[in-house]
Structures are given as C-alpha cells and as structure tokens.
Image (cartoon, rainbow, N blue to C red):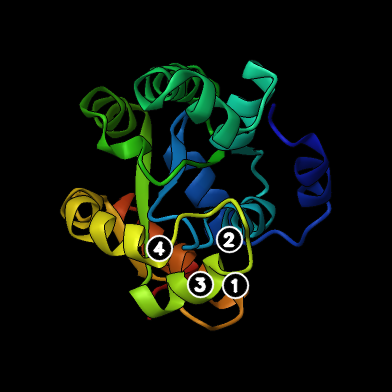
Amino acid sequence: MVETAVQKHAENAPESASQTDIRRALGTRSLVLVGMMGAGKSSIGRRLATRLNLPFADADTEIETAAGMTIPEIFERHGEPYFRAGEARVIARLLEHGPQVLATGGGAIMDQRTRDLVHIKGVSIWLKADLEVLSKRTKRRGDRPLIDKMKDLLPLREPVYALSDITVQSRDEPHDMIVDEIIAALPKHLNIIASEGTQP
C-alpha cells in the first residue's frame, strides 16, 4: 500500500521550482530505486518521496502484505521461483499507480519483464554501495544474507543494476545527502530545461 502518511507529510514540505518541474516531467512514471539489500532503498526512498511531494511504496512490504507472511517465510515455504513470480506481479501492479517513489527488492530488477516495465513506466535509480557498506548495514538485521552470499550476488547483479537510468553512490553519509544527489541528477535525465529566471 502506498504510504499516505508520507504523502501527507510531503504536502506540507517547502516547494521549489525544480521539484515541481520534476513531477511534471515524470508524468505518470515512477522513480524506481534498485540495488542490493542494505543499499538504503527504503530509507532513502521515503526521504526522496517527501522531498518531491510524491507517494512512497515499498515492493517488499507489499509482497508481505499480499502473501500474509514475511519474505523469509515465503522463501522457506514456497521457494524462490514462487517468490520471484509474485514479486514481478506486485511491481507491475505498483507501476500502474505513478508517479511515486518505489523501492524494490535486491533481486527484482533481475527479471527481464520487470526491467522492461520499469523502463516504460519509470525512471530507474541504482543506489550503488560497496561491499563494506553493505556488510556493515546488513549485520544489523538477522534476516539478511551472510556476507559470503552478498559476495556471490554482487558480480551477478551489478552489471544489471548498471543498466539503470541514474546511478548514485550510497555510502556512509546522511541519507539526505544522497537524496540531494538524486534530485540534482533528475533534471538532466528528464530533459528539464531551467526556466528563464534561473539562467546564468
């Protein structure tokens, strides 16, 4: 479910011309955050949504709500193919409700159909984080893969993540700084031309 509380808070946030221009240029497209678990997609996504006055949705949360169980439970009871099929359906449904900021699971974008849909209905943003940062963050959660698993996944996933429209380095800095960098990168990708009042 789209987080209306975030949207409500965002409606009271200060507006800027660039935020308005970004929303207008997006039309019905979503800003889709991709990257490894621990890259900060949910935390950064919520902040980005607030800054742009957009709704926020988390695909993993939606999957758990639809299934009535946690993602580890889905994997244990039904296996990964079952989970991936459901994940693709949920993301396809969410992409029908843009504009929004959508955080996806680490393996979601590996599905070719999902990549194609994101390309059509969204702007993909890779939150690129190195192994040290990912390891530090994932150690805080018991349901995250071990570091050895992440070492195996990174070389498989990074070439696909690199196909994203925008890449921003996720690092040990305040998340608001990462949000600033995403917002700074969006106008160029969306072909937003500065208004006359902001021309040098």
The alpha-carbon separation of the residues under discs 3 and 4 comes to 22 Å
* SS at circle 2: helix
Q: Mark 3 points at which residue?
A: 178
Numbered label tally: 4
Which residue ends up furthest to the front in the rendered image? 76
Query: Which of the two discs, 2 and 1, labels the residue nearer the N terminus?
Result: 2
Mark sitting on residue 44: 2
Above/below status of 81 relative to 34:
above
Q: Is residue 21 left or right of residue 6?
A: left
Marks 4 and 1: in contact by CB < 8 Å?
A: no
The alpha-carbon separation of the residues under discs 2 and 1 comes to 6 Å
Query: Which of the two discs, 1 and 4, labels the residue nearer the N terminus?
Result: 1
* Residue type beneath disc 1: His
* Nearer to me, 33 or 74: 74
* Residue type beneath disc 2: Ile
Q: Is residue 111 left or right of residue 193?
A: left
Marks 3 and 2: in contact by CB < 8 Å?
A: yes
Query: Which of the two discs, 3 and 4, labels the residue nearer the N terminus?
Result: 3
